[in-house]
Image (cartoon, grey):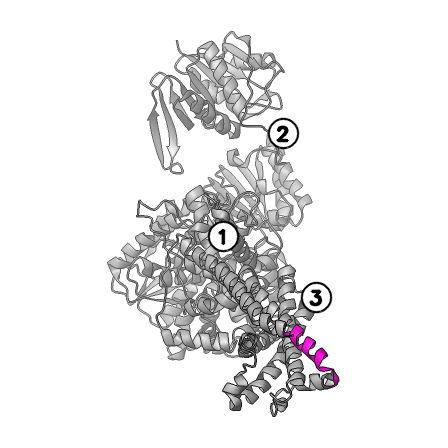
Amino acid sequence: MEKVGILIELKDGKIKKTNFGVITLARRQGCELFALILNGDAAACKEQLRQYGIGKIVDVTTAEGPLQWNPDNWARAIIAAMDHFGLTTLCGLASARGKDVLPRVAAYLDAPLVMDCVDLNLNERTARKSQFSGKTIATIKVSGNHFIFGIRPNAIEAKLEPCQAEVVSFQTDVESKGLVVREIKQQAHSGIDLTEADIIISGGRGMENPENFEILFECARVMGAAVGASRAAVDSGWAPHTMQVGQTGATVSPKVYIACGISGSVQHFAGMKTSGMIIAVNTDSEASITKNCDYYIVENLFEIVPILTRQLKMVVDPI
Amino acid sequence: MSLYYTIKPILIVLGLLAGFGFFFIRSRRLIQLMTRVSGSHPIRLDRLPERLKILFTEVLLQSRVREKRFPGLAHTFIFLGFIVILPHTIELMIAGILPGFSFARLFPALYGYYAVLADILAVLVLVGLAYCVFRRLIFKPKYLTDGLDSRLILLFTTLIIVSFFSVNAFRLAFYPEALQGLQSGYLISFPIATLLGLEHLPRQGLFIGLEASYWIHLAVILYFLVYIPGSKHLHILAAIPNVFLAPLDTPKPMLRSDLENEDIETFGLGSVDELNWQNVLNLYACTECGRCEEQCPADLTGKPLSPKAVVVDVKDDLIGQFANNKNTIEPIVRPGSPITEDVIWSCTTCRACESVCPLHIQHLDFILEMRKSLVLMESRFPEELQETFNNLENQFNPWGFAAEKRADWCRGLDVALMSDRPNAEILYFVGCAGAFDERGKVVARSIVNLLKKAEVDFAILGPEERCTGDAARRAGNEYVAQELMQANLETLGKYKPARILTGCPHCYNTLKHEYPQFGAMPEVLHHTEFFAILIQNGILKPHVNLETTVTLHDSCYLCRWNDMIDAPRKILGAIGALKIREMERSGRQGLCCGAGGSRMFMEEKIGKRINIERVEEVAATRAETLVAACPFCNTMLNDGVKETASAIAVKDIAEILDQATG
């Protein structure tokens, strides 16, 4: 039976939920799964990973303890672990880190790499991925001694399949000569990632000041939405650029997009036009957004949003 | 004494040989650089009378320099003064070798007049120099670089003129008989001699004074001669050929890169060896007057770009890279280079720099080609452009709207498609903004209304239309631009319309001046000029009075790229009761809105936003309506109006005219 390694990504010591989709996908052909944990407490992850059918949890460490983030060191450590446990295939997330480390592993092993996969068949060695902005789906067949796949986050719904699991320690010494990580700068942003959100509530010039964004955050928390902003709000310094939706910000396609106090210039519309449903709240009945939405409310957003929050709370938590 | 007379000519000959020799060597090195660069550019010597006329008016009469009045006047004095004292200098050089030589003997009749002229102009040079010193040390405009180079030049020129007077004064006192009858000609020098009481000095003293003045005069001139090729004063050599060979017409296409040729290994301008001879001549011609920087919207709003600095930095890099026969030429944009990616991407391509440059330097040829190199060779561009590039490639519009919905804006308007009316007289090229932007659609409908009022036989391309390529081309993506251009040309070739009307200055400029690089094109008109003609011919009659005060924002791609300044003013002038209040920066000096050069699709993260700067100027006119003629200007200014909470309506000129024609 083929042995498959899964690179597990942790955030603040906890397993990112998107990992479980990768595990679910890799499990399908009945391969033996090895979870590779490089920067955290493998024992603490055991229970969760077991639930999704991981039999072996490899605690990869160096003499100094868990590995600090360095894509080159990670790639070398992963290769050492793959070699040691006889893993032929490696699956990981096509996330920011995955995009940094998986190609390095592939390059060192001279192995085929398919990134952003939405489906896999490890027996047939085929991967499916979308191309040309989702216009076509390619099925890619790979051959070689090793195979590396990056799975698009949230592409696969995670399913439980508990099994027995054990934690194995693996120590390796890696030191990248060519690459040193000096500093990691994280853009401060709160809540859910815009591009992955099902619901987005955005504020524009009508928000008037940064403090008012809090009413959007409050509403977003209730319905599990992400908060976005128009360029006008970002330019005014009311919201960070990471929240910007539009031509020069994030391109989003949530199921529902709620635009509050956004006139909906073409530059903004371009970034959210593929949303499933667009709802606008604007005092100007002539605003461009009213011509490009499914529903609009001509009313002050400071009245509407709190009402929406209140109503949603009643649904979520009726008491 | 006789020993001195014996060795003086020898010393002078040696001095002249050394001075001219070094000058020749240093100049030759500069000329060699023009031939060592690999870029190609034709030498244009067509329309010779026009070129000679420009040389006469702009160089000899200094007309363009004086567009900035006081510095221009000062420069004119200095320039003409030095031209006029040149024969005097030559005379002195010869006289040093052949004692007693004087043009006064050769041309006795003329010499008197010449002496008057030279004396007067030399004084004017001093006046000009005094102004320059005053300006550099007291006014200190930001756009002037005050450094050792500029101060040395002022010192040298002043020394030359002062010693000119001193030589003359001592000569008059020392050889009173030789210059008999000419004293009156030395309007200034003779009174100086009298004032200093030189005639009372002993012969010995006069001799020493004369010889000292002479040597100082000659030494400064010779040293200056050697100094020039390494200084910004090089412009005195490069300006004439640069102006003479400059493009004669304002409109110009961007350089076409041959993407089909598989032997070409680099595109755009990545390192100085890829410059062409004309670029290099441009660099030599720059005298760092800073007029470009003063006009540049990027510099004005605190961006790192100054067109002057780009020219100076590329020049320094050129000379540095080719110095000491280095084997490798480094890229222009490299760690530590003053030309950073931020510099290159800050440009709005408004062309204010080029249009104000007294020496016709083509700044954009550098900036746009550097963008091309970054994008095509290294895939380096502001990340937010990625989406725009993708959209242009996939959906043929920058926003990524479905290409097949391009004609949806005119549903119910009874607008024909070219596929249904292939023989329509005019093809109305709507453009992406007119087709997809809500604001743009309103303007497009006004244009349609006007065309119908004028009973123009027109049709649109609808889904067959694609972005003209302007946004991609000016963002350096020549590849996507050419794809779009080729596809549009194919469609146009199918219908062969007699004329194309555009609603966007960017479409207009690209179709009119850049498409002919790839294939034959019909006449292209912007709606402003077209409607101005229709009004002039009495076909459109603005009979409705509009009681409003407007101010006009000139689109860069109309006013500076295409000299179209009168047409919008004619339209507004034809509307009853409408008052125009011009902004301080209008017409050819109009300030950009900030969207050109594909800046529309980039973030403006550094400094003040250009549209805010412009809207503040608009607000100062206290006009009720701001008239634009470009969808990008419209968007930017409208954003600025909202941002500054001004109560100004931003309208396209077509909307105003639609209203005025009832």
- Residue at position x 57%, y 36% from top? A226
Report the magenta residues as a range.
Answer: B200-214
Chain of residue at mark 1: B
Whole-percent x and y of residue A306? 64, 41
Does label 3 lie on the same chain as label 1?
yes
Residue A212 lies in what quarter of the image?
top right
Circle 3 SS class: helix
Pick the front one: B291 or B351: B291
Looking at the image, residue B543 lies above or below residue B239: below
Pair 2/1: label in front:
1
Circle 1 SS class: helix
Does label 1 lie on the same chain as label 2?
no
- Tell me the crowding category of disc 3: few under 14, some 14 to 19, or many 20 or more residues within 10 angstroms, Cα based: few
Circle 2 SS class: loop
Pair 2/3: label in front:
3
Amino acid at dot 3: Leu
The residue labelled by disc 2 is A318
Looking at the image, residue B457 lies above or below residue A217: below
The residue labelled by disc 3 is B137
Where's the N terminus of chain A, which quadrant?
top left
The residue labelled by disc 1 is B318
Amino acid at dot 1: Leu
Q: Which numbered marker is on residue B580?
A: none
Amino acid at dot 2: Pro
Magenta span main SS: helix
C-alpha gap between disc 2 and disc 3 = 76 Å
Whole-percent x and y of residue B62? 52, 76
- Residue at position x 39%, y 52% from top? B38
